[in-house]
Amino acid sequence: MSETTPDNKRNPFTRPGFILSAALIVALIAAVAVIAFLPRGDDEPDASTTAPSNSTPSSTGTPTEEETDESICGLPDNDETALGEAPESDWELVGTMAVPSAPETAGPGVADETGFRSCFAQTPTGALYAAANIWATGFFGDPAKLYQELAADSSVRDQALEAIANGEEVGSQNVPSMQIRGFILRGYTDQEATVDIAVETENGSFGSLPTPLVWEDGDWKINLPPTGNTGLQQLQNLNDYIRWGEF
């Protein structure tokens, strides 16, 4: 399992863990709402803060087949296992959030008439692009379609789809504006990846959006933990992250 991190020592600001709904969208809105109203972190790290766990992706929800499924839209794979620098990216808006796009190499290889984006390459860059697009879809897309197509098969996914089918409100129209500012590829194999996306909210606060992914049915899917909380937290600064995004 390879990890991509900048050379500087990890020392971000760690908030207490969120207790969130199993519904991913609710978790996203709740976490970003908290981040948006917290004070902006200082530029210098605080030695008293606690670093996030440098864990490898969970095996929960991982496909059992030994052979890797091919990309559902024919995107190429490769043998790379890390990202040492930010990939050059074109950026497109999903709602008000800019996300990377390379349809012939990293993805999304499929975008339907509603703008829903899926099919990402089985590569480190593909996993990074998938994570960024999944979060943007979580904030601004169709919740039912998000769970149906971009969440790995699990009881958490089933509960979310059942809640939506029962008419429970999922999502919010009051999502704070945010943009991607960096990433860490914390772990990668061709079956699992953990991508940590750093975002900046409209008031200048920074947040971390850890994204556990599994390769399932020829695409990267978010692997929802039982609590629905992937480890969302505020960041004091972006010192630990590879800078990336449309500035």
Image (tube, helix red, strand yellow):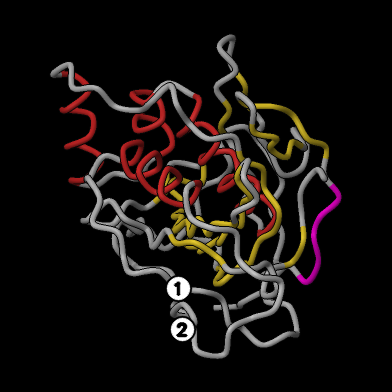
Q: Position of residue 140 (x, y in %)?
A: 50, 25
Q: Residue furthest front?
A: 39
Q: Quadrant of the C terminus?
A: top right
Q: Quadrant of the N terminus?
A: bottom right
Which label number is shown at residue 145? none
Name the residue: 33% across, 23% down: 144
Front residue of this view, candidates 228 and 67: 228
Question: Mark 2 is on which residue type?
Answer: Thr
Lower sequence index among marks 1 and 2: 1
Query: In terms of secondary structure, where does tag 1 sit?
Result: loop
- The relative height of residue 6 versus residue 211 in the rendered view (above or below) is below
| In contact (CB < 8 Å): disc 1 and disc 2 | yes
Name the residue: 67% across, 75% down: 240
Name the residue: 56% across, 32% down: 118
Instruction: Report the predominant secondary structure element of the magenta stretch.
Output: loop
Judging by the rendered image, the residue that carries numbered circle 2 is: 50
- The relative height of residue 242 versus residue 214 in the rendered view (above or below) is below
Q: Position of residue 160 (x, y in %)?
A: 22, 34
Judging by the rendered image, the residue that carries numbered circle 1 is: 14
Front residue of this view, candidates 169 and 192: 169
Q: Residue furthest top?
A: 113
Specify start and end residues of the magenta stretch as a single range.
Answer: 84-88
- Horizontally, is 82 left or right of 18 in the view? right
Quadrant of residue 99 within the rendered picture: top right
Question: Mark 1 is on which residue type?
Answer: Thr
- The relative height of residue 99 versus residue 187 in the rendered view (above or below) is above
Label 1 environment density (alpha carbons within 10 Å; few <14, some 14–19, many ≥20): some
Name the residue: 45% across, 45% down: 32
Whole-angstrom CA distance, mark 1 to mark 2, is: 6 Å
- Give yes or no for residue 225 being in the magenta stretch: no
